[in-house]
Amino acid sequence: MFTDLISTSSLLPTRRQFLSHTGLGFGSIALASMLHEQQAKGTPSINPLALKPAPFRPRAKAVIWLFMTGAPSQVDTWDYKPELQKRNGQPLPGSDAKTGFFTTSGKILKSPFEWKQHGESGSWVSSIFPHLSRHVDKMTFIHSMYLKANNHAPASMELMCGSNQPGRPSAGAWLTYGLGAENQNLPSYVVMHERRPRGDDQIWSAGFLPKTFQALTLDARRGGVIDNLSRDKVESAAQQRASLDLIKEMNQKHAQLRSPQADLAARINSFELAYRMQAAAPEALDISSESEATKKLYGIDQKHCEVFAKQCLTARRLIERGVRFVQIFAGKNAGNDGAVDDVPWDGHRDIERNHYSCGAATDQPAAALLEDLAARGLLEDTLVIWGGEFGRTSDSQGSVGRDHNPNGFTLWMAGGGVKGGYHHGATDEFGYKAVEDKVHVNDLHATMLHLMGIDHEKLTFKHNGRDYRLTDLGGRVITDILA
């Protein structure tokens, strides 16, 4: 009996435990009551895409990132190296077989293109960019980019997510999380592609952020159609609204009985956004209303660049309507001569044939985008970024190709608070490695966030017990390039 009494009493709560548990219970009841009252009164739930003011004055309101899938060669585009021309075929000093993904010859390969200086800045540009060369005085060139990964998928993730580990949120998702949406009838983050790049969804993923901040993807092969957007013909607008209201009410009641669930909130929000997009998205994506002069400016009438041209024009229309981050991945249409597995700009076999084709497919549309944005007064607060996931080797792969090179490459930015006609950093005399004012992707992201009015060290999200950020544990703002 004594033993049983001890056993029973040990199960009884202490006075402190009793007060603690009942206090929590009363708190839960009060919270449930408040939520019920809000629901009854029709108080709207928190919208994760609600517009949030930038912490400090932004220089840019939107970003258009022209991603040159497959990695352009810096020494055949924007980084002129006379020593390559002089010492073609000679051993490349410092050549490292581990630089690329395959095996290189160790012998210098000169650029097969003609180079000229352009603009008041006297910027050297390869002959594959006859249109973009006219806009060098709008551009800041970063010649000292570098990262760790030396293959397409992990390098693309590193460039866009700050890390080559799958599952990290992309830059567009972080911006959407930090600033919300300016237009509640359109997504804040849009990705356009043709053939999916290596790494595909991981490059533009929301990662561990709530799925509310994921990108809307548009496949050019589908003619700009958004899946499942059109209203069912047998359902009227009133019927659809009634259905959505019922689903929303059921989901909110479900959420009230459980701890906060980000995925459920994202699902509720996605239904509502899709409903609003039915009217706004088709108009935003319809370029038929553009003048013939504008279409011709972008090159929509030319077969070799029509896909990228339509994407660039669509990007301008989207940022005009409040979309915050638009990314275009140059696809198969961007030229694949001499590329491996039809990946654009991936000139392993023949750099001249490959880059000439890719340049022709992207040059005019990208130049038209800069010209069009400037003419409409949009360039000053739109940051345009051009570049690939890494560069290419200064020595040859085979006889006339170039392998991957993450140790030094060029990326340029225009508009949105950066200097025009400015060159930052440098590679060595052969364009092989970044040696002066090196810029890591974390620095690039820190600078982009700064231009958007965000301190990169304060934009954080708690995951697996620690705070993460786009720049993770690194990153510095490249102050020299700021206008």
Image (cartoon, rainbow, N blue to C red):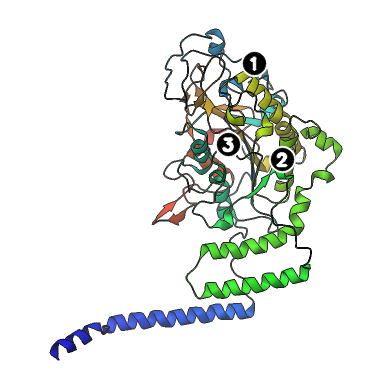
Q: Residues within 10 Å of mark 1 (few under 14, many from 20)?
A: some
Q: Can residue 320 be seen by looking at this rendering? A: yes
| Distance in Å between CA atoms under marks 2 and 3 | 28 Å
Of the residues under marks 2 and 1, which one precedes in the sequence? 1
Q: For mark 2, what is the residue?
A: 311
The quarter in which the N terminus is drawn is: bottom left
Q: Is residue 462 above or below residue 5?
A: above
Q: Is residue 275 above or below residue 432?
A: below
The disc label shown at residue 113, or none: 1
Q: Is 42 in front, or is 360?
A: 360
| Amino acid under disc 2 | Gln
Q: For mark 3, what is the residue?
A: 482
| Amino acid under disc 3 | Leu
| Element carrying mark 3 | loop
- Report x, y in % for residue 285: 75, 48
| Amino acid under disc 1 | Phe
Q: Is 379 in front, or is 365?
A: 365
| Element carrying mark 2 | helix
Q: Is residue 85 above or below residue 479?
A: above
Q: Nearer the viewer, mark 2 or mark 3?
A: 2
